[in-house]
Image (tube, rainbow, N blue to C red):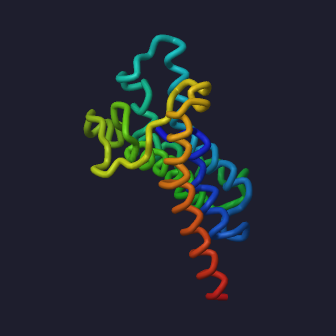
Amino acid sequence: MPTIITHAAPVLASGIAVGRRRLPMRLFWLAVVCSMLPDFDVAGFLVGVRYADLLGHRGFSHSLLFAALCGGAAALAAPLLRCRRRLAAVVAFLAVASHIFLDALTSGGLGVAAFWPFDEGRFFLPWRPIRVSPFNPRAFASARGIAVILSELRWVWLPCFIAAGGVRLWLEKKK
């Protein structure tokens, strides 16, 4: 998995790209939370859930079904978010889906249960350039931790913000 902070990079970049008028702040912050939400499955380790279990890391919470459920919940919360239901649903779904996509690009772990319940397998994408993040925060002070951070900067943060800048320029030019 990329670090939990890096999972927010696509949402942060999208917010920069489209601006506040198109992405209300409450919805933006919900999307940030949704982009990180699947990794809260690691709390299961504290109560004996194993990594490979359905409720384990990269299991159900890393499925497109979970993304759709988050989208549905966001649609219900749309009045509180001060946006249209469809926009809330799409943004929340895409935020969770971006998490699934990034985890499928990593170099380690068991893969993501993206298609559960239709397929119980765990998958990676054929190209896996992002170094898998350690679970232990102290590991970031090691050579491996530095390599993970540099990998995320190269393969996630830089492309996201280059794309955001390009979209922002394009939208400004359209005005």
Residue at the top extreme? 48
Q: Nearer the viewer, residue 143 or 78?
A: 143
Question: Picture coordinates of residue 106 (x, y %)?
Answer: 40, 42
Q: Is residue 35 above or below residue 40?
A: below
Residue 73 visible? The answer is no
Examine the rendered structure and indicate whether residue 3 appears above or below residue 157: above
Pick whichever, 55 or 57, lies toward us: 57
Point 42% across, 25% down: residue: 55
- Above or below residue 18? Residue 124 is above
Residue at left 50%, top 34%? 144
Q: Is residue 77 left or right of residue 135?
A: right
Tell me: residue 40, above or below residue 23: above
Q: Position of residue 162 (x, y in %)?
A: 56, 68
Using the rendered view, name the quadrant where residue 62 is placed: top left
Q: Is residue 124 visible?
A: yes
Determine the residue positioned at 51% across, 40% down. Answer: 148
Residue, far front: 143
| Total tally of numbered discs in the picture | 0
Q: Is residue 18 left or right of residue 10?
A: right
The answer to whether 31 appears left or right of 105 in the picture is right
- Front in this rendered view, residue 132 or 42: 132
Counting from the top left corner in percent of width and height, residue 70 is at 53, 44
Q: Position of residue 42 (x, y in %)?
A: 51, 25
| Quadrant of the image containing the C terminus | bottom right
Q: Nearer the viewer, residue 103 or 137?
A: 137
Q: Residue at x 55, y 52 (%)?
A: 153
